[in-house]
Image: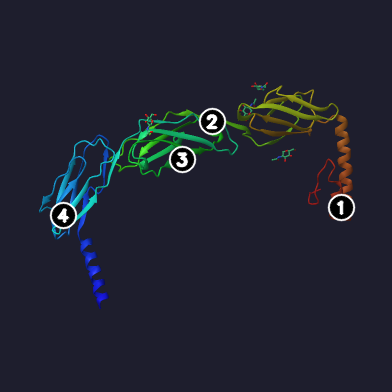
Amino acid sequence: MRLFLFFIFILYAGKRALACEIEFDPKEVFVKFGGSASAICKTSGCNSATGMGWESSYGGTGLEEGVSTLELKIEKIVEWTVEPKCYIAFSNDEQKTEKLPMTIYKMPEKVSMPKPTTPMKVTGEYYLIQCDVVDVAPANKLVISWYKGNEKISEKRLEDPSRKPVNESFQSTIEVLPEDNGKKVWCEAKLNLPAEQSPPPMRSEAHVLTVFYPPTFTEPKNKTLEIDAGTEISLNCTATGNPIPVYSWHFKHPTEGEIQRQNVTGPIFTVTPEFRVSGVYSCVASNNVGKTTKYFILNKPKGNLTTMAVLLGVFLALGAVIIIVGAIFVTENGSCAFQKGIYHPTASDPL
Ligand SMILES: *[C@@H]1O[C@H](CO)[C@@H](O)[C@H](O)[C@H]1NC(C)=O
Ligand SMILES: *[C@@H]1O[C@H](CO)[C@@H](O)[C@H](O)[C@H]1NC(C)=O
Ligand SMILES: *[C@@H]1O[C@H](CO)[C@@H](O)[C@H](O)[C@H]1NC(C)=O
Ligand SMILES: *[C@@H]1O[C@H](CO)[C@@H](O)[C@H](O)[C@H]1NC(C)=O
């Protein structure tokens, strides 16, 4: 029974204490260092209260009797540790006190970004970027963002309870793409305050990115061409890359052996009528980041045979046709054995 009464007492006491409340309007005060602030303290359900008041290092209000709301005004805040408190005095000499949530802020004196590593390479590497802010408060409301060509690439915040101004260095990483060459990067400091009070963000200087990337072809890597009569053939190996690629051409000549040309012709190699040999010409476009090879497959002309060749061709074709026709009579897939010839018939060809 005694225990039961004890619980009743605990519940009653708890309810009484809960019923008397202090509220602030606004709920939290944001004030620029050097600016003015005001807040209203409101009490509710405090039956045995005799009065209320504000306490502050800028001078409080003193105890006001018989009121349930009381305003505090501070003309000019030039201290980082101001902590006004609202209190209620009860008839039994007890007090209930509540701190006014208050944020005193100051935009940085300076925001700067050290010049990033240059040049950067497009090889999946991450590069460190930094942002330095001087004399900003409070640290835990600070949001640092980095931008690359108007696109936000990273964001950092701090868990620092310090109310006084701090100097901070933030770091993040950046990965670059070929199209980032020439883009600008910078960082920005912002205080995360309610929208209507938020000062405009402050930017660092911008740096232009130099991005090195390997040679890349806009067209497919392999190209098949046919040698035409009398005309020159231009093989175009133009690749984009930074630094500008250099080109080397390779071709294995059946009689003269390996022919190699280092950047003689640049990206365009001209196959002159005197030098026309079918085969695979390869071009290596390279710079200090990488290299890429493009193959040009030059095929023998089809309609430009000498008379001898024409005659020989006709003869061989006729022979093949005769043999194939014969073979088809013997077996349906007998023609397979002759597919390496000049002619490429299949069993379904209308003969
Ligand atoms: C921040 O840096 C400035 C100048 O660089 C210096 O005058 C100031 O004392 C520093 N503040 C703190 C809190 O270290
Ligand atoms: C291009 O040609 C080269 C040499 O003939 C060959 O090794 C390669 O697989 C070809 N690449 C494509 C994408 O066709
Ligand atoms: C070679 O190709 C590039 C694009 O791949 C093109 O800009 C250039 O005009 C071409 N050059 C010639 C001589 O055809
Ligand atoms: C290679 O050729 C290109 C195009 O003609 C030229 O711009 C480049 O300077 C040359 N590089 C070297 C190392 O000779």
**Label 3 vs 1, first from the N-terminus:** 3
From the viewer's perspective, tell me whether residue 213 is left or right of residue 34. Answer: right
- Judged from the image, the secondary structure of the residue bearing numbered disc 4 is strand
Residue type at mark 3: give it: Ser
**Label 3 vs 2, first from the N-terminus:** 2
User: In the image, residue 76 lies at what x, y percent?
Assistant: 21, 35
- Residue at image mark 1: 334
Residue type at mark 1: give it: Gly
Q: CA distance from mark 4 to mark 1?
A: 113 Å
Determine the residue positioned at 58% across, 38% down.
Answer: 125
Q: Point out which mark residue 154 bears.
A: 3
1 to 112, vertically: above or below: below
Depth check, front residue: 234 or 320: 234
Q: Is residue 232 visible?
A: no
- Judged from the image, the secondary structure of the residue bearing numbered disc 3 is strand
**Label 4 vs 3, first from the N-terminus:** 4
User: In the image, residue 167 lies at what x, y percent?
Assistant: 39, 34
